[in-house]
Image (tube, rainbow, N blue to C red):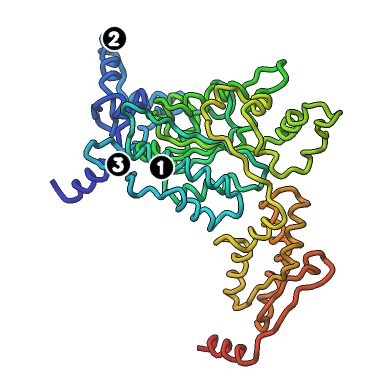
Amino acid sequence: MSEEQDNVKKENSDYEDICYICHRTESRAGKMIHIPNNICICSDCMQKTFDSMNNGAFGNMPSYMDLMNMNSAFGMPPQQETPQRQKLKKKNPEEKPELDIKNIPAPHIIKEKLDDYIVGQDFAKKVISVAVYNHYKRVATNTMDEIEIEKSNMLMIGPTGSGKTFLVKTLAKILQVPLAITDATSLTEAGYIGDDVESVLSKLLAAADNDVEKAEHGIVFIDEIDKIAKKQSTTNRDVSGESVQQGLLKLLEGSQVEVPVGATNKNAMVPMTTIDTKNILFICGGAFPKLEGILKKRLTKQSNIGFGGELKDRYDNDPDLLSKVTVEDLREYGMIPEFLGRLPIIYALRELDKEALIRVLVEPKNAIVKQYQKLLALDEVNLLFDEEAYEAIAERAIEKKMGARALRAIIEEIMLDIMYEIPKDDNIGTVTITREYIEGTGAPKIEMRSSDRIAKKEATEEE
């Protein structure tokens, strides 16, 4: 055998053949039968083909090429091409598990790494660090003997811009596991326009490079989970609410699920594979915008007359109101009890106040202020911000009521003219952003370079 054939054989060893007729993979349909034109057929489909030929006129059957020519002659689309083999890694019993109990970082180490990128939310970071550590410790040790450890799926509740999605992204980066971030608003009941619940696992499989074993140890983050709450109106069929919650039950609890490879919906043209969800960590997140009203109603249910009365506006400005949420509040919001029962860890993220927003601007490793300072440093210009400028930016972000997301929009707006004008003049050395410039009543402070630095730069350019 030549060296080229050896390389092809080695390259194809990571792939599975897919039946041309039923589109099942080799791990599900069994050993494939190879025929000319690079076509693979499973034993079941081959037997059915022989049976149909024996029951019909065997001698009068047209050939494969005749069928192709007939379709072209009558203006019909040609026969489908041979489906490409997906990179579904075959399970090898000799391979060692990727996760090792010794390599799993402890909860305090996970939290320290989260602190480098995320400001505040200490309680949420503590909860998610412990839950993830226990989950992957369970996966790595495969503790399924007398005492079976169940999964620790999580539900995060927090206003927009509080860091729910960024928290999960940073966590997956630290653990170096596949992460799929999907939106619950596109999920519908099977048979309706939209994505089936299995599309959640399809995205995880794609994030794991179609490696089934790697995907079975990944993390799935379902955002906007509050959008699939039960609808209050019963006049129309609820195809994107309670029915989607029912469909997600089997995924959250752990079961063998058939997943389309490379698509979001099941159909006859898409190959299927089976994924076991018992070791996949599911994290759901949502803003739950009307949940605060339900909480206030429950907390102020007591009469407001007398010595033990509760004032109606007592919790209007409570920053920790969401932390008082209970399962009963979420049930009243529209989440079914079976769904909540599979999310045992429920915690809330606080809305970012003025001090937290200022810290978000400067403290994280990839803070937006540091990004612009690096951009201007490439032009040999120093970018500085006054303390009052930080306060003005945070105050504008609070007015927008978008949390940390508003900071980027404000910085982009105030830096537009500066980024446009600075390259015009090579003599600019330092730019200081002031509160007056942010409020539109003044201009930034600009300091020119010293003559020595200008001469040095011109000499460098001449060389």
Report how far apart the C-alphas of labels 1 and 3 lie in the structure. 15 Å
Q: CA distance from mark 1 to mark 2?
A: 48 Å
Above or below residue 22? Residue 373 is below
Q: Quadrant of residue 280?
A: top left
Residue found at x 61% / y 52% = 120
Mark 3 residue element: loop
Q: Are marks 1 and 3 in contact (CB under 8 Å)?
A: no
Mark 1, other Cα within 10 Å: few <14 / some 14–19 / many ≥20: many
Q: How many marks?
A: 3
Residue 72 appears in the figure: no
Q: Residue furthest front?
A: 307
- The residues tagged by marks 3 and 2 sit, at their Cα atoms, a distance apart of 53 Å
Residue where numbered disc 1 is placed:
208
Q: Amino acid at mark 1?
A: Ala
Q: Would you name the residue on which mark 3 appears?
A: 97
Q: Residue tagged by mark 2?
A: 57
User: How far across and how far down the image is residue 410, in percent?
Assistant: 72, 58
Disc on the earlier residue, 1 or 3 = 3
**Observer-nearest of 297 and 268:** 297
SS assignment at label 1: loop
Question: Tag 2, which secondary structure?
Answer: loop
